[in-house]
Amino acid sequence: MKASPARMYDALLGGSHNFAVDRMAAEAGTKLVPDLPRLALSNRAFLRRSVRFMIDAGIRQFLDVGSGIPTAGNVHEIVHEVDPTARVLYVDIDPVAVAHSRAILAGRESAGALQADLRKPDDLLEAVEATGLIDFAQPVGLLLVAVLHLVSDEDDPVGKVGALRDAVASGSFVAISHLSSESRPEDAGKLGEHSANSTRVGIQFRPKDAIVPMFQGWDVVEPGVVDLPSWRPESEHDQHERPGNSLGLAGVGRKP
């Protein structure tokens, strides 16, 4: 059994929805790059800020693709603090992550989880529509947080984002975070090699000029595509990493 990126992420965040193999892989990654847990926290903080940004913009339905396991502080909790009737649908390829998600969400009519593959966007969109939770005729908050680096170049991550963009209404938003080799290529190389050996899917640490095209067709909001701690920090408590030193890039765009 190999580690799952979703459960490794949960382990790095201190969650309980992971197995020994995931914890061992997370610990080995941390030995290679000691601030790896801070990267996980920084990504989580970006998710929170981007969701709140979309809520403030009037979004009341969220599609979280590559969601992993909705542990403490995830999308439905953030959204339902503002509007308990807002809808959240989690989508992940990992059946264990989806099973955990459904157990956590049991009894919530306005939130759900399904198993689908981002690499097959037509099938994913059909499955999303079948749930009845997401109305593609109305603006959607599309979350692609820490998932596109699991899509190989051969599987065309830019094209996959474009297929989802074409499906959502004008006024929708997308939030993307992506592991990057931009500022620390040596550490990115170490973690990329580690992921290839320890997980079922390799992790692609891409440079900024390979990540920016994922926002094609979206109007990118200020401050643009920047490192994780630099995207609209709300306080010093958001600064889990030193700006300019993160292994992740992130941004939010609006469909015109």
Image: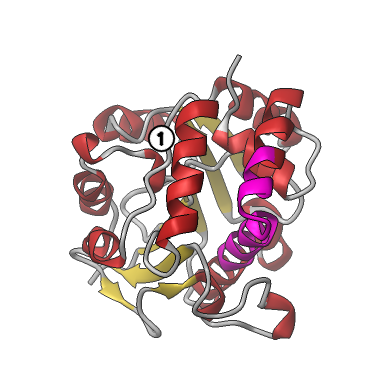
Element carrying mark 1: helix
Please give the name of the residue rendered at 55% of the width and 80% of the height, measured from the top-left corner: 243
Above or below residue 59? Residue 27 is above
Residue 142 showing in the rendered view = no
- What amino acid type should be assigned to the residue bearing mark 1? Val
Quarter residue 70 falls in: top right
Q: Is residue 51 magenta?
A: no
Residue 31 within the segment the image draws in magenta: yes
Residue at point 29%, 37% (across, down): 152
Q: Nearer the viewer, residue 56 or 212?
A: 212
**Residue position for label 1:** 128
Give 253 or 112, whichever is nearer the viewer.
Answer: 253
Seen from the viewer's position, the closer of residues 112 and 66 is: 66
Predominant SS along the magenta part: helix
Rendering quarter of residue 106: top right
- The structure residue drawn at horizontal position 22% and vertical position 72%, both measured from the top left corner, is 256
Give how far across and how far down residue 226 sits, in percent. 41, 76
Residue 220 picture location, percent across and down:
30, 75
Q: Quadrant of the N terminus?
A: top right
Q: From the viewer's perspective, is residue 73 above or below residue 249? A: above
**Residue 222 visible, this angle:** yes
Q: Is residue 182 left or right of residue 68?
A: left
Q: Position of residue 136 (x, y in %)?
A: 33, 49
Label 1 neighbour load within 10 Å: few <14, some 14-19, many 20+: many
Identify the magenta region.
Answer: 28-47
Horizontally, residue 107 falls left or right of residue 85, namely right
